[in-house]
Image (spheres, grey):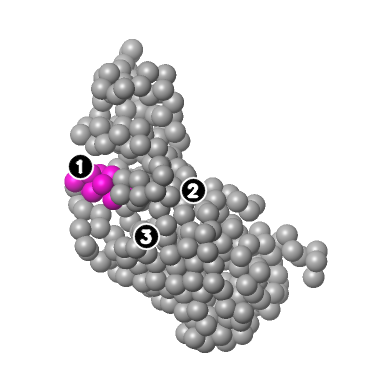
């Protein structure tokens, strides 16, 4: 149940915009509000964003998935900020107060093909808790989801 | 496009309903005929069909009609996707980075 999975993934994107703009949009608080916090159907309850993304700056947020009262938190701390070039940050997530994951992320910005290539790598420790075996896994998933989704008004 | 619904959001939405979670719980014991499933639930058959439609759209269940009997069963791949936060996190970032692209495109004219 209380099992940790270590996992890493890399996402590659090309944006047809100058690197300075892409880096700016990635780090500007007003821009982040739109693409990071409002780009999916989740409900944002609270956001404490730093005025400037720099080393040791922290960003805290609380939000819920669509149709659910489960509350997730994201605590981000920037480790290194190389303007227009690279960001390294960590973030820890919880769901209804229980640990969900702790991750280390590297975001590289490179000028390429008349725009910007963004390479996002996450290395994390995840509280997966997904037991092997379908029935057992399903029951565990339902138990966990029931707890999460029923915690509020659902 | 902003405010797009990711596959993960669809899964969350599908499971936000207690009746649908009850259906998934029953199907966890194995495939069932829709009529058999409906008989064990305190709701009408059309309501069961409607809930199954939502679960199927979210990829949580699959169904097939053989003769006059429609069988439904859980899609283990969807449950695994749901249970693995590592993959959930990746899906979240996919959505965000697409959102960043949309944001850049939409604000382009203002530069």
The image's mark for residue A95 is 3
Q: Residue furthest front?
A: A153
Q: A69 or B83, which lies in front?
A: A69
User: Is disc 1 on the same chain as disc 2?
Assistant: yes
Identified at 46% across, 54% down, the residue is A64
Dot 1: chain letter: A
Identified at 80% across, 70% down, the residue is B111
Give x and y (percent) for residue A72. Answer: 42, 60
Magenta span has B19?
no
Q: Earlier in the sequence, mark 1 or mark 3?
A: 3
Q: Main secondary structure of the magenta part?
A: helix
Residue under numbered circle 2: A66
Residue under numbered circle 1: A135
Identified at 54% across, 72% down, the residue is A48
| Quadrant of the rendering where the C terminus of chain A is positioned | top left
Q: Residues within 10 Å of mark 1 (few under 14, many from 20)?
A: some
**Segment colored magenta:** A134-145
Q: Earlier in the sequence, mark 3 or mark 2?
A: 2
Magenta span has A143?
yes
Dot 2: chain letter: A
The image's mark for residue A149 is none
Q: Nearer the viewer, mark 1 or mark 3?
A: 3
Identified at 25% across, 66% down, the residue is A4
């Amino acid at each position: 149940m209380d099992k940790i999975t270590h996992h890493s993934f890399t996402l590659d994107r090309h944006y047809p915009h100058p690197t300075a703009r892409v880096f700016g949009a990635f780090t500007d608080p007003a821009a982040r509000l739109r693409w990071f916090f409002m780009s999916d159907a989740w409900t944002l309850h609270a956001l404490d964003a730093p005025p400037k993304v720099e080393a040791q700056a922290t960003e805290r947020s609380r939000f819920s998935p669509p149709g659910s009262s489960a509350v997730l938190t994201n605590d981000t701390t920037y480790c290194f900020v190389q303007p227009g070039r690279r960001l390294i940050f960590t973030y820890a997530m919880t769901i209804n107060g229980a640990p969900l994951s702790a991750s280390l992320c590297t975001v590289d910005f490179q000028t390429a093909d008349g725009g910007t290539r963004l390479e996002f790598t996450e290395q994390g420790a995840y509280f997966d808790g997904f037991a092997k075996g379908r029935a057992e896994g399903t029951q565990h998933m339902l138990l966990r989801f029931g707890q999460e989704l029923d915690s509020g008004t659902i | 496009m902003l405010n797009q619904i990711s596959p993960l959001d669809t899964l969350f939405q599908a499971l936000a309903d207690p009746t649908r979670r009850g259906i998934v719980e029953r199907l966890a014991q194995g495939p069932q005929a829709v009529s058999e499933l409906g008989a064990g639930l305190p709701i009408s058959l059309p309501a069961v069909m409607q809930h199954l439609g939502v679960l199927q759209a979210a990829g949580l269940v699959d169904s097939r009609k053989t003769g006059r009997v429609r069988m439904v069963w859980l899609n283990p791949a969807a449950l695994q996707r749901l249970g693995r936060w590592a993959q959930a996190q990746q899906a979240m970032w996919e959505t965000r980075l697409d959102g960043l692209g949309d944001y850049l495109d939409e604000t382009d004219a203002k530069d």
